[in-house]
Image: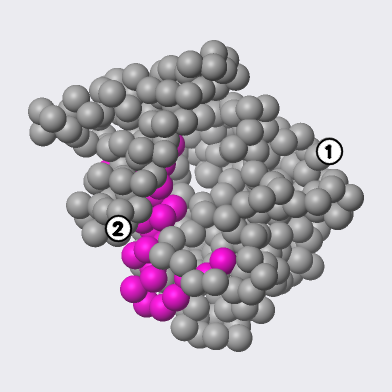
């Protein structure tokens, strides 16, 4: 199968350059890579990367927002796959701070090739810096990938393929059958929190989604380029409610997610954790609940906060 890669980036040109190194080392080389920034500084220096110089990929600048940026990437890929059988190619979405094992794309392709009913997969995240205060360094990522350091507990750690309702956006694959027409919901602006779950869930209408142990990688969890604490906190409430009403996220899942995040924001605000803006997130949570009471809650409100 042919593999294509889309990388939406903001404020992380250095991290994206390293990701392109990892993509060049894949045992199944991507047929084409599209990197989409929100301004020229997001892609600064990437035009000097061998992958771009060899015309195996291109750089695009468009309006900020992970959903919009990824949609632009999908549109580019669609134009390059018009003559291909949609079931025989796939698009991989990597966060700019994700570090895939060298056989990540090959393992994903093998799994999709073996079962045409599979529409998407996400891999085993050996360590996830999003759940830490300082993130994971490039050196630490190498230690996890080469087996020198044992993997950390993570929901994606499974012994055999397990079916899901959504995928983890830092490393997810969608078969061309869905990628050729399904698009990210741009009503989830900026960081677009939970846009991956929504996109994958709608892709699931044509088949099945799985987490598979063969696709291993590390998510650094780099803090730069992320949305402000207040905006992110607002999205932690507004986005799950929006998706639950839309029907792409179960209400019980949305409620559990919201209250888990509120509890974490309260606890980490009280412990004076200054690495990330947890007080800001908590204020965003409260603002969203205020809008919910007033019947003004909408994910797009983060644009005006």
Q: In percent of the image, x 55 and y 85: which residue is there?
A: 115
Looking at the rendered structure, which numbered label has been put on residue 286?
none
Q: In percent of the image, x 54 and y 28: which residue is there?
A: 225
Q: In percent of the image, x 43 and y 17: which residue is there?
A: 279
Q: Earlier in the sequence, mark 1 or mark 2?
A: 1
Residue 3's quadrant in the figure? bottom right
Under circle 2, the secondary element is loop
Q: Which residue is mark 2?
A: 250
Q: Measured from the top left, where is residue 236 in percent x and y?
A: 36, 36
Instruction: Give, as a single range, the part of the protein colored magenta.
Output: 187-211
Q: How many marks?
A: 2
Q: Nearer the viewer, residue 195 or 135?
A: 135
Q: Nearer the viewer, mark 1 or mark 2?
A: 2
Q: Is residue 32 visible?
A: no
Q: Measured from the top left, where is residue 6 in percent x and y?
A: 55, 54
> Relative to residue 83, is residue 60 depicted above or below?
above
Q: Which residue is mark 1?
A: 139
Q: Quadrant of the N terminus?
A: bottom right
- Find out whether residue 172 is within the magenta segment: no
Q: Measured from the top left, where is residue 250 in percent x and y?
A: 30, 58
Q: CA distance from mark 1 to mark 2?
A: 38 Å
Q: Nearer the viewer, residue 187 or 265?
A: 265
């Amino acid at each position: 199968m042919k593999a294509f890669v889309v990388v939406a980036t903001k404020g992380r040109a250095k991290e994206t350059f390293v990701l392109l190194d990892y993509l060049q080392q894949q045992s199944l080389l991507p047929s084409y890579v599209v990197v989409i920034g929100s301004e020229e500084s997001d892609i600064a220096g990437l035009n000097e990367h061998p992958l771009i110089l060899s015309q195996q990929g291109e750089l695009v600048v468009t309006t900020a927002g992970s959903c919009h940026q990824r949609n632009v990437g999908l549109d580019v890929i669609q134009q390059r796959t018009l003559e291909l059988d949609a079931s025989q190619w796939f698009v991989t979405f990597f966060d700019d701070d994700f570090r895939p094992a060298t056989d990540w794309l090959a393992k994903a392709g093998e799994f999709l090739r073996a079962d045409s009913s599979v529409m998407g997969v996400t891999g085993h995240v050996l360590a996830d810096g999003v759940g830490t205060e300082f993130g994971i360094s490039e050196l630490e990522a190498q230690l996890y990938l080469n087996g020198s350091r044992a993997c950390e507990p993570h929901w994606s750690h499974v012994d055999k393929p397990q079916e899901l309702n959504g995928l983890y956006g830092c490393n997810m694959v969608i078969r061309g059958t869905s990628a050729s027409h399904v698009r990210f919901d741009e009503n989830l602006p900026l960081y677009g929190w939970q846009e991956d779950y929504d996109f994958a869930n709608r892709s699931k209408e044509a088949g099945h989604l799985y987490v598979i142990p063969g696709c291993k990688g590390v998510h650094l969890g780099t803090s730069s380029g992320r949305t402000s604490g207040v905006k992110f906190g607002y999205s932690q409430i507004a986005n799950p409610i929006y998706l639950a009403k839309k029907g792409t996220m179960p209400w019980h899942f949305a409620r559990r997610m919201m209250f888990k995040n509120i509890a974490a924001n309260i606890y980490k605000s009280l412990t004076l954790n200054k690495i990330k803006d947890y007080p800001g997130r908590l204020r965003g949570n409260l603002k969203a609940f205020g809008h919910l009471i007033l019947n003004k809650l909408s994910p797009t409100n983060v644009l005006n906060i």
